[in-house]
Image (cartoon, coloured by chain):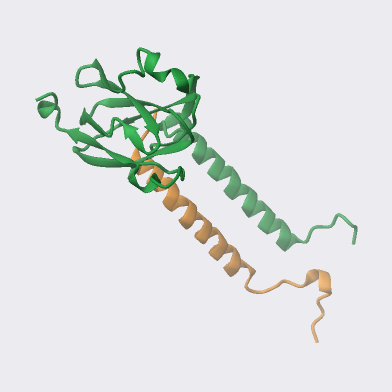
Chain colours: A green, B orange
Amino acid sequence: MSALHIDKHEKRWITISMVLLAAFAVLIGVAGFALGVQVPTLEQKIDPAKLDQDPEWSNPGVREIVPGKRYEVFLIAQTWQFVPREIVVPAGAKVTFYVTSRDIQHGFKVLDTDLNVQVIPGYVGKLSYTFKEPGEYKFICTEYCGLGHAAMFGVIKVVPPEEYGQ
Amino acid sequence: MSSQSPEEFAPRGTWVIVILFVALLILIWGSVYWMLLQYGPTV
């Protein structure tokens, strides 16, 4: 028996494990590139000390890009709150979130969705989502940021399109 | 007395363990994957 001999039963395990890994990799590719389930990106850099002087960040909140179809949300995380704490968007519209931190590292996670990003001071996280069903979607800070961390949450109110803006 | 040499020995039950291993991996991994797909796209 040579030093490189691999038992046939061990080969079977190696083959099956490799096939599984390859299948999982393909499925991850399908989810990411064909079905749009992607990891959020850090879109740009920004000076946290100058947020109030920035025209987009000095007044965070919802921006209507295409009525009923596309919205942008500028969200600031800071100890220990999100600004704004309440967001209202219509159901069925694509909502793009831009999230940054004013001070230390936070997290932004919308419960029961794939929306989840580290909020790092100096960077803007970008992620998009379409809320298909009306309802309340809570978001929380997922990075322990001090004594008030547990109180750092907010809510996205998704309303029927016909009720939006009333 | 068995005529099989140690190299020819075929362990019994290997397939059972392989099937359990594969089924468990697919079940655990698949449940998370399915959850991701249910939440919908993020781009």
User: Residue pushed farthest right?
Assistant: A2
Residue B2 sits in which quadrant?
A: bottom right
| Front residue (pair B15, A45) | A45
Which residue lies at the image location 82% right of the left edge and 73% below the top edge?
B6
Vertical placement of B26 versus A35: above or below?
Answer: below
The location of residue A122, given as percent across then percent down, is 50, 24
Residue A7 sits in which quadrant?
A: bottom right
Residue A155 sits in which quadrant?
A: top left
A114 relative to B24 in the view: left or right: left
The image quadrant where one finds the C terminus of chain A is top left
Which residue lies at the image location 37% right of the left edge and 39% below the top edge?
A80
B24 relative to A81 in the view: left or right: right
The location of residue A1, given as percent across then percent down, is 90, 62
User: Residue pushed farthest bottom?
Assistant: B1
The location of residue A104, given as percent across then percent down, is 48, 34
Vertical placement of A122 versus A77: above or below?
Answer: above
The location of residue B18, given as percent across then percent down, is 60, 63
| Front residue (pair B33, A56) | A56
A104 relative to A130 in the view: left or right: right
Which residue lies at the image location 40% right of the left edge and 45% below the top edge?
A149
B41 relative to A66 in the view: left or right: right
